[in-house]
Structure formats: C-alpha cells, structure tokens
Image (spheres, grey):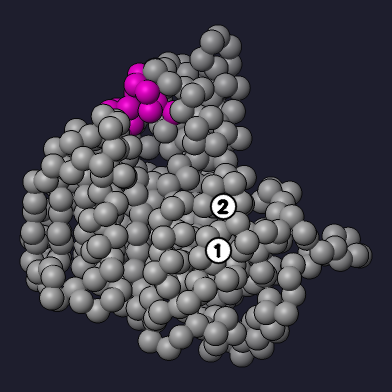
Amino acid sequence: MYPLRSLLLAGLCLCAQVSAAPLVKRGSSAITLTEPIAPRDDPWYSEPDGFENDAPGTILRIRKAPGNLTTITTNCSAAYNILYRTTNSLYKPTWAVTTLFVPKNHTDALLSYQIPYDTADLNASPSYALYSNTPTDVTASLGKGWFVNVPDYEGPLASFTAGVLSGHATIDAVRAVLSAKECLKLPDGLKYALWGYSGGALASEWAAELQVQYAPELTFSGVALGGLTPNITSVLTTINNKLMAGLAVSSIIGTCNQYPEIMAMLESKLKPTGDLNSTSFLAAQNMTLTETLVAFAGKNISAFFVDGEMDILNPITDKLISKDGIMGYHGVPQAPIFAYKAVEDEVSPIADTDKLVTSYCAMGANILYQRNSIGGHSAEQTNGRAAASAWLDSVLGGTYSKTYNTTGCTIQDVALNVTSSPY
C-alpha cells in the first residue's frame, strides 16, 4: 500500500539489527547514543515530514533501545524503540513510541503491556522510564517466552486519561509490531493480548472498545483489565481532597493537552496568586506520578480555580469528557475480557465498573469479572495479578476454552489477599 515507506522500513530494520545503538542527527553531524536521552531532549522523538500521509500503525522510525535496557531487563535478548503513526483524540494524525522486548526463548505470543505511568510529564514515558524501573509483569512475561510490547500510549503531549488517543496509540503499537514481523524475525501466527492496570487498563479498555471500528483487521486473543476507571468525572470527584488528588491534576492537564482551546480556557481560570495558584498547578507537567501524588496529596483541586469546581466541570468540559473520558460508547469489545477490581477501590467507585460490565454483557461481550472484597486500588494490582496472569496464559496458550466460559459473562465475588496493604 505504501511501497516507498516499505522500502524505508526495510532499511530501518536492517540498521536496527546490526547497530548496537541508534544514530541521531544533530545539525550536520551524527552521534551514537550510548545512554538514553529524555524524550523532550532526544530528537529521535519527533515526526518525520509527511508522516500524516501514512496509515495508522505505520513504522516511522525504529532503533535498538539505547544504553543497557536489554541487559538490565531479565529474560530479554533484545529491545527496540519503534516510533509509529497513530491518531489523536480529535481523529487527527499524530505519533507515539513503543518499546518491544524480545524474550530469550520465544513462543508465538505477544503481550502488549500498558504501564500505568499516570502523569502529564512526557519524560516519564515508559520508553525512558523503563531504564530505572522495569515492571515484574514485563520480566515475568518475557520469562514465559512472550514478546512484550510497552507503548507510550499518552503520545507526544503526555495526554494522561485522553481515552481515544490512548486506545488508538495502544492499537497502533500492536499494528506497528506486527508489521515489523519479518525484519524483527517474529514468528508466524503470533497471538496477541492486552494487559493493563489502572491507567494502563484505561488505555487497554479504550483499545478494546475502539478496535471494532478502528482496527477491524486485528483479532486480540484477550484483554486483561485491572482497576478500571470507566468515568473520569467520577474519579475526579472521588479523589479530590484525598491522598490520590494529584491524579486529578495530571488528568486535567493530560486530557486538555489534546484540546488546546480548552486548555487555554482552564489556564485562564487558574488563580494567579495564593497558595493554590497556576504555577503550582501547572508544575505537574514536569512531575512523575509519585511526585504529583506527594505534591497534591489531600488538596482541594477545585480551589486552584477562580470559580472552583465550576471551572473544571461545566458544559464545555462535560462535552469533552463524554467523548474522551467515559468508557463504553465507542464499541463492544470483541475479544474475551478479564476484569478485576477491589470493591473498596478508593480511586474509581466499583459501581462504575459494575455498570460498564453490565452494559457490555447485555451487548454480547465475553467477560470474566472478579470483584475483590479485600484491599483497595493499589493493593488490587498485587492481589489480582495471579488471576490475570493465569487468564492470559490461557488466551495466549490456546487453552482458554478448556478453562473459562467462552460466551456470556461470569461475575465472581472473591476474597484475594496477597499484600498486607489495605489501599
């Protein structure tokens, strides 16, 4: 379909296979990266001319991950950065980056693992953050022989909680990896699945519901979703004044990064002076998840605005959230779903996930939903891990029909207690 791009991709893949580090042009000279550079400072993180004319999922650049990512990641034989064309929340062309890990001994399975990086800071994107913290789910999956894809699904604007973009970027990361099958020597007949918790589940769920309209050619084997946040408005009101209030700040900034006019409107409504002012609010653009949670813990986020909550939740922002922040309105997931959530989740009320599951079940989805009576939002990531991992083993290992119901919905109330944390 794109013969010139195909030739360029073949060349890029050849370079990626033979070069231990990528070449990045700066002015008239080229340098070899021996260490990763933060995305804001790395010119590799930019779109090539004419990229908007390529199909979603087209690889625009590929390189071996710089530095020591392969050696510091257990069970990994190679790691690649792939920059690809995707589609933003306004359905306009944009780009994103994904990191593909190759296992030492591979099977025919690909897991797209969406990390909950939950921040409006571009430099906290997984392709860079993985150097300091590779999740155990990634290394464990590599140990099973799975290829593991980890996308920067918030895109180049760090659009945390922008659902449509997150879903598109997740789907197109999988498209990009599959399109590089030959040059990266991936096996034929790859089965592929999605897994994410919290913000990672947000991206995974949006991918699952958008797939039927956006990527009908893809057939996901399954989608595991932990700690779902189906309604962003509900999340904002639930966490305000609480320990996790910083998520609201990153969400407001992240989503509005997709809508410049609305972002400008909100910035104009921030208080210029006082303890809760625009400078301290917008500082979240350069904060990791942990830094944001510490900075805004217990704060009333609406107090940063001149007219309080009215400036955050109004007819203009409600319209935005209705199409980019509430799940369940873009399509019914075609793949089997495993959803798991703590009944006492303090970030997103269990009722929101109950409602979403009920809606999908009424429309014919195949869902196993476990409601855990023990722990809260953070604890459930640990408490639900074993069940999610076993479920993914079945969908990627071809044994799903032997273990789980392949039609309809199964809702289970469980009491899984792996961690001592009540949160």
The answer to whether residue 82 shows anywhere in this view is no
Image quarter hosting the C terminus: top left
Question: Is 156 in the magenta?
Answer: no
The residue furthest top is 274
Q: Quadrant of residue 93?
A: bottom right
Residue under the point 74% across and 55% down: 35
Residue type marked 1: Thr
As drawn, the label of residue 130 is 2
Residue closer to the observer: 57 or 313: 57
Instruction: Identify the magenta region.
Output: 234-246
Residue under the point 90% across and 65% down: 29
Residue closer to the observer: 130 or 45: 130
Label 1 sits on residue? 99
As drawn, the label of residue 396 is none
C-beta proximity under 8 Å, tags 2 and 1: yes
Q: Could you say where residue 49 lies in the image, as x and y percent from the top left? A: 70, 69
Q: Could you say where residue 381 lies in the image, as x and y percent from the top left? A: 31, 45
* SS under mark 1: strand
Report the Cα–Cα distance between label 2 and label 1. Answer: 9 Å
From the viewer's perspective, is 341 left or right of 197?
A: left
Residue under the point 56% across and 52% down: 130
Determine whether 141 is above or below 272 in the image: below
Query: Which circle, 2 or 1, is nearer the viewer?
Result: 2
* SS under mark 2: loop
Residue closer to the observer: 158 or 369: 369
Please tell me which of labels 2 and 1 falls first in the chain.
1
Residue under the point 72% across and 51% down: 37
Determine whether 130 is above or below 145 in the image: above
